[in-house]
């Protein structure tokens, strides 16, 4: 057991920290309403400096570093209050799936622009009638000559309004059992027949979208795996999402805890410092402890990954615990403003930061696997309890 | 960052788990708890090397966790975590050989009773006088490490008047101890004593956090086993989400507690600069988690989990003991808050 960085890790951390202080320090924190083009340029800066695709194989533009470096990257980005690369769906879902299942041609075509932020990806998995039950999807693709003709509707698709490509799960064979009839396509979001309609979240922001496919023609070769492999390919995508998610979440929670500490040390609207209230002090300490516990749980799971090649089961609850911690933390922050927490616009406390993140946090227990589904997964796959379905 | 225990430590864990499981099944554990302990196990602990001064805190960490998984009805925590760090090396050798059990006496009646609170017990011309309460395993100790105004002192049990107290957790009872001009040997004085007491507290917090992890793990194992085997409405109750989600919640909190407890253990063993915060965090979180795990397991068992015959209440009472040690979790969080906010 050794919790110190290795000399190589320490050097990487120091180099990144100094790069960030030169390239990011001092830029303002924002609500959720970042300027996307600025973010894209930031993604390009990160790529040019060598901080994108750290764990990817070098032949695909990565640095082939162990996952520990990705953890350090995420921690330092949070500590510097720097936003991440905007191509999260591409980097965490589409890219690893293309590496695992793609042809050489596909890897050549898609990976580099995905890393440097010039092409943005979105995900077409959920449908109005199939959320947690992914395999029940009904969006269809029928072969017509050299093209799949896609018809249907996807929903809850983040970044679709900015995206160039979509990883799309479609039903290509309705005659077989539901898991066996799926295929996994790469759809061009600029193709005729693709309509994106923003869905406004409870924050008021259109962070995610509905996507409508009306006779959209996708080249026959734009498929990952064979027709009928869609379920297996999609599991690669989701496994990778969960595998790298933990550190992003604990780093994000660290950032929020630090902001919470800044908040409660300032005088509130009534002139009193929330940090002088023992109830607030207890709650702040609780969330700091929670953040440390998630951080170290990620490292424990990573140790298992490095030893065995498989992430440890201990990490399976991190998203569940993080989502609830983030909800408690942001509600606590809003509570210190009293009724001032309601005031929006130019007079909004903290420029609306806590309003946005408190409302946004309600999605945390729904997105990327609802807490109910995650509890089922832990019960069945980790604890070995009998399946309820 | 490497979170893995060494191969030797993993072997020690396996050995400890099978030794404890063979000596303390749920029936014998109950009878030792009711009778106030298992005095004859002490010689075994010595011969297995569990009391050796050479063990690192990470070695001991494995043992603390396992003696929570099967609550050891012997003064292992009191001797190893509370007393030994204050002892000189020849006295510590006596502990290692199995001839000496020791504990720490700090709390006094009618005044604040945290480990670092000021005390009234005084020493004059090598004689110590004062009244101590809530001394862990006080009735079985051969030697007391006593917190006095001017420092830490060693007093033989033969020179004290010990009054055992009945306790909820029968495996770890407390006693009141009166000292009246008892011959006392100084172990540390002044600032040195204060720093030593701080390190003892860190160590005790980490040890109890690890025990709490063991307790919570056993409670979860019992809950999961019962949910698989117990049938109602023709199906094992584990298919019902009202039950399975309880188990998942316990699992998640337990993993968090374990991560904090190992972090704290490592910080203690390395004398890391984050040791104080890590130990506060681990004790607060793991203490509450142990209690939570037992409560969920009792609920998940239905009526049988609420009976005296079932082993769960033994774990529950150990969980309550360790969560209450040196004040509830909110006290530790108040100290964490001071680091963060002041």
Image: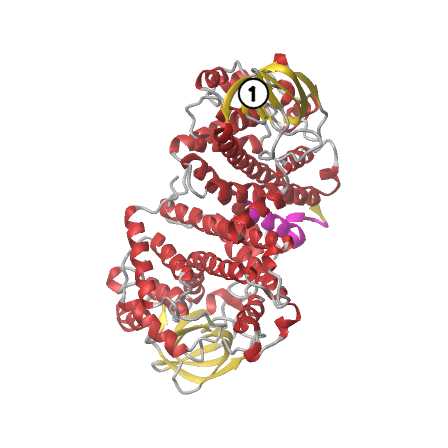
In the picture provided, is A32 more to the left or to the right than B291? Answer: left
Residue lying at the far bottom of the rendered structure:
A192
- Mainly helix, strand or loop, the magenta region? helix
Q: Quadrant of residue A160?
A: bottom left
Q: Give the range drawn in magenta.
A: B233-254
In the picture provided, is B295 more to the left or to the right than A20? Answer: right
> Can residue A260 be seen at all in this image of the molecule?
yes
Where is residue B71 shown, x and y percent of the image?
Answer: 60, 30
Residue closest to the eye, B313 or B22: B313
Residue closest to the eye, A35 or A169: A35
The vertical placement of A263 against A139, above or below, is above
Where is residue A173 shown, x and y percent of the image?
Answer: 46, 72
The vertical placement of B150 against B198, above or below, is above
In the picture provided, is B270 more to the left or to the right than B69? Answer: left
A280 inside magenta stretch: no
The vertical placement of B292 against A184, above or below, is above
Q: In which quarter of the image is residue A389?
A: bottom right
Task: Name the residue located 54 percent from the left edge and 36 percent from the top edge.
Answer: B205
Say how the picture is coloured.
secondary structure
B242 inside magenta stretch: yes
The vertical placement of A194 against B332, above or below, is below
Which residue corresponds to mark 1? B102
Q: In which quarter of the image is residue A50?
A: bottom left
In the picture provided, is B4 more to the left or to the right than B198? Answer: left
Residue closest to the eye, A161 or B318: B318
């Amino acid at each position: 057991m050794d919790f110190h960085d290795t000399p190589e890790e320490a050097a990487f951390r120091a180099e990144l920290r100094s790069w960030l202080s030169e390239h990011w320090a001092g830029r303002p924190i924002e609500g959720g309403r970042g300027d996307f083009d600025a973010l894209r340029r930031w993604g390009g800066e990160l790529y040019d400096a060598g901080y994108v695709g750290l764990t990817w194989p070098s032949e695909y533009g990565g640095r082939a570093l162990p996952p520990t470096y990705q953890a350090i990257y995420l921690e330092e980005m949070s500590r510097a209050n720097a936003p991440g690369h905007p191509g999260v769906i591409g980097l965490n879902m589409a890219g690893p799936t293309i590496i695992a299942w793609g042809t050489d041609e596909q890897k050549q075509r898609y990976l580099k622009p995905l890393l440097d932020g010039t092409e943005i990806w979105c995900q077409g998995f959920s449908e109005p009638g199939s959320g947690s039950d992914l395999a029940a999807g009904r969006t269809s693709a029928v072969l017509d000559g050299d093209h799949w003709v896609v018809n249907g509707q996807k929903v809850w698709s983040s970044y679709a309004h900015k995206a160039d490509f979509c990883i799309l799960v479609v039903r290509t064979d309705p005659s077989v059992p539901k898991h066996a009839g799926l295929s996994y396509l790469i759809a061009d979001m600029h193709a005729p027949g693709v309509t994106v309609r923003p869905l406004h979240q409870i924050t008021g922001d259109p962070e995610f979208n509905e996507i409508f496919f009306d006779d959209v023609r996708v080249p026959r070769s734009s498929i990952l795996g064979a027709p009928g492999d869609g379920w297996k390919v999609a599991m690669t995508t989701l496994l990778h999402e969960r595998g790298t998610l933990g550190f992003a979440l604990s780093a994000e929670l660290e950032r929020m805890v630090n902001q919470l500490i800044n908040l409660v040390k300032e005088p509130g609207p009534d002139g009193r410092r929330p940090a002088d209230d023992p109830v607030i002090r207890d709650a702040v300490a609780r969330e700091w402890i929670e953040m440390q516990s998630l951080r170290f749980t990620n490292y424990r799971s990573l140790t298992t990954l490095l030893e065995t090649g498989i992430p440890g089961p201990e990490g399976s609850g991190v998203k569940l615990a993080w989502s609830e911690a983030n909800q408690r933390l942001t509600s606590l922050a809003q509570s210190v403003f009293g009724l001032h927490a309601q005031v929006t616009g130019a007079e909004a406390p903290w420029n609306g930061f806590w309003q946005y993140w408190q409302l946004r946090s309600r999605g945390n227990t729904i997105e990327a696997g609802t807490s109910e589904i995650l509890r089922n997964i832990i019960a069945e796959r980790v604890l070995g309890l009998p399946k309820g379905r | 960052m490497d979170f893995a225990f060494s191969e030797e430590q993993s072997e020690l864990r396996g050995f400890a788990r099978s030794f404890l499981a063979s000596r303390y099944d749920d029936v014998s554990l109950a009878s030792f708890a009711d009778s106030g302990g298992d005095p004859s196990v002490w010689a075994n602990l010595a011969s297995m090397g569990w009391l050796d001064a050479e063990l690192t805190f990470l070695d001991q960490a494995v043992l603390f966790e396992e003696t929570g998984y099967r609550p050891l009805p012997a003064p292992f925590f009191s001797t190893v975590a509370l007393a030994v760090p204050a002892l000189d090396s020849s006295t510590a050798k006596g502990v290692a050989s199995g001839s000496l059990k020791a504990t720490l006496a700090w709390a006094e009646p009618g005044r604040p009773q945290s480990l670092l609170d000021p005390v009234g017990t005084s020493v004059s011309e090598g004689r110590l006088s004062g009244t101590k309460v809530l001394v862990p395993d006080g009735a079985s100790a051969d030697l007391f490490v006593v917190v006095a105004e001017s420092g830490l002192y060693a007093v033989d049990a033969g020179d004290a008047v010990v009054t055992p107290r009945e306790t909820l957790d029968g495996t770890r009872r407390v006693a009141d101890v009166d000292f009246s001009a008892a011959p006392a040997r100084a172990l540390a004085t002044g600032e040195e004593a204060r720093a030593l007491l701080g390190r003892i507290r860190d160590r005790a917090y980490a040890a109890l956090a690890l025990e709490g992890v063991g307790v919570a793990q056993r409670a979860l194992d019992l809950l999961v086993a019962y949910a698989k085997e117990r049938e109602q409405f023709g199906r094992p109750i584990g298919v019902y989400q009202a039950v399975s989600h309880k188990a998942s919640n316990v699992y998640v909190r337990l993993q968090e507690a374990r991560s904090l407890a190992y972090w704290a253990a490592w910080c203690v063993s390395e004398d890391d600069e984050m040791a104080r915060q890590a130990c506060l965090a681990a004790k607060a979180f793991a203490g509450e988690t142990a209690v939570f795990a037992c409560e969920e397991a009792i609920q998940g068992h239905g009526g049988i989990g609420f009976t005296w015959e079932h082993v769960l209440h033994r774990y529950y009472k150990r969980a309550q003991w360790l969560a209450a040690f040196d004040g509830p979790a909110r006290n530790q969080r108040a100290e964490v808050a001071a680091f963060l906010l002041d």
